[in-house]
Amino acid sequence: MTTPAYDLALTGGNLLDPAQGINDAPRDVAFKDGKVAAVADRIDPSHAAQSIDVTGKLVTPGLIDLHGHFYHGGSGSAVHADQTCLSSGVTTGVDAGSAGFLNYGAMRDYVFPAHRTRLVAFLHIGAVGLAANRALGGGLHDMRIINVGETVQAIKDNPGFVFGVKVRMHYDAVARWNAHEAMAKAKAAATEAGVPLMVHVSGTPIPLPDVLEHLGPGDISTHAYNGLPENMLDNAGKVRPEVRAAAQRGVIMDVAHAGIHCDVEVVKAAMDQGIVPDTISTDVHIAPPGRIVYLMNDLVSKFHALGMTLADAITASTSRPAQALGLQDSIGSLAVGMAGDAAVWEQRRGRFVWHDMAGHNVDGALRLDTFATVKGGAVAWREGRLTQMGEC
Ligand SMILES: [Zn+2]
């Protein structure tokens, strides 16, 4: 008996892979040695060690969550990535500043390697990240917590693990009189290390334009569609000129939903005026009771309900975040040779209502339900796997 050509084949499905220009067209996908080995109209299942019939289902690249909290056990609000990501079609998660230069070691050496989800980090400009967040409401109350040189060194020492710098511009996290200094230092660290800066822009203690002026092409404005004071709209509901200018110079407008940081009415007004999210992300964390934290499959569905085409919503959760990380040559698409990360979706039709914490809702007619998640060319999660009697 000869060795099968492929480890795994997904047959009979429709492929939506914007980076390849394939828009919901019939394609089979096969994986070998952790990578995509073939994309074709038809792949013979007998050529694969394992094949899954995904007839009637949608296949996309594995989703990339550009803003989550995955330092499980290392900060009070970080989730276990495999439990939240794989079941929602996410194969790559970016930890947004749970650790800083003093406490990233356990994240790199123990927490991330214990997961099947691909995990990378943005280091917080504060030395211990969000470790004290629950107790102190943020990390930048004392400017001694910032050390630009040590942060830069930590980033340079860890290519492939650290991809950026994070700073939280929230009134609980940093005093108004320290905010400019914190922004300048965070930007200096990112520039010196040659990585993007991600800024939390919800509830800024200083005017939003003062924050955005530090951001250049490839930097990330996260929680961009929040509804707190100093959001992206002016009092007349118009996108502020400084926000439009930032978007035009290539600042990435990232959702980081988290329930409290994304207002349906702000999204609608901004999208009407052409400021469409570049990247859809969750800000997944262990939330207080009553807070709605949607996972990626629901957010893709919600932004589809808000008016993005499904192809655009998938772009914003696959190839676009891959570009933001500089990883567009290895993840975010199912082109041959790319990482073997895929999601298979059941497209549920009906009436679905998505909420935000401001009390605004949006109705949609489509929800993506995860059917299977493939990571590194092997099935990492499959619908119903915990409920099939006798399977284990
Ligand atoms: Zn966050």
Image (cartoon, rainbow, N blue to C red):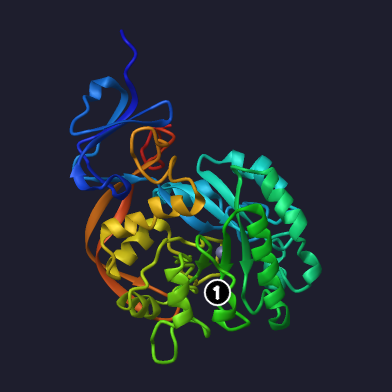
Image quadrant where residue 62 sits: top left
Please give the count of numbered marks on the rendered protein. Answer: 1
Residue 249 coordinates in the image, percent (x, y):
46, 68
Residue extending furthest toward the bottom: 236
Residue 131 coordinates in the image, percent (x, y):
70, 61
Residue extending furthest toward the right: 144
Ligand 1 resides in the quarter of the picture at: bottom right
Quarter that holds the C terminus: top left
Residue extending furthest toward the top: 1
In the visual, does 224 lie left or right of 206?
A: left
Residue lying at 49% horizontally and 81% vertically, measured from the top left: 231
Residue 7 coordinates in the image, percent (x, y):
36, 25
Image quadrant where residue 353 sits: bottom left
Q: Cβ(mark 1) to ligand 1 < 8 Å?
A: no
For residue 98, say whether it is visible: no
Of 134 and 95, the residue lying toward us:
95
Residue lying at 33% horizontally and 55% vertically, measured from the top left: 314
Q: Secondary structure at mark 1?
A: helix
Which residue is tagged 1?
A: 212
> Mark 1 Cα within 10 Å, few/some/many (few <14, many 20+)?
many
Q: Is residue 40 above or below residue 185?
A: above
Residue lying at 36% horizontally and 69% vertically, measured from the top left: 276
Image quadrant where residue 33 sits: top left
For residue 60, say whether it is visible: yes
The amino acid at mark 1 is: Leu
Quarter that holds the N terminus: top left
In the visual, does 70 lie left or right of 280?
A: right
Residue 305 coordinates in the image, percent (x, y):
28, 68
Residue lying at 62% horizontally and 74% vertically, measured from the top left: 169
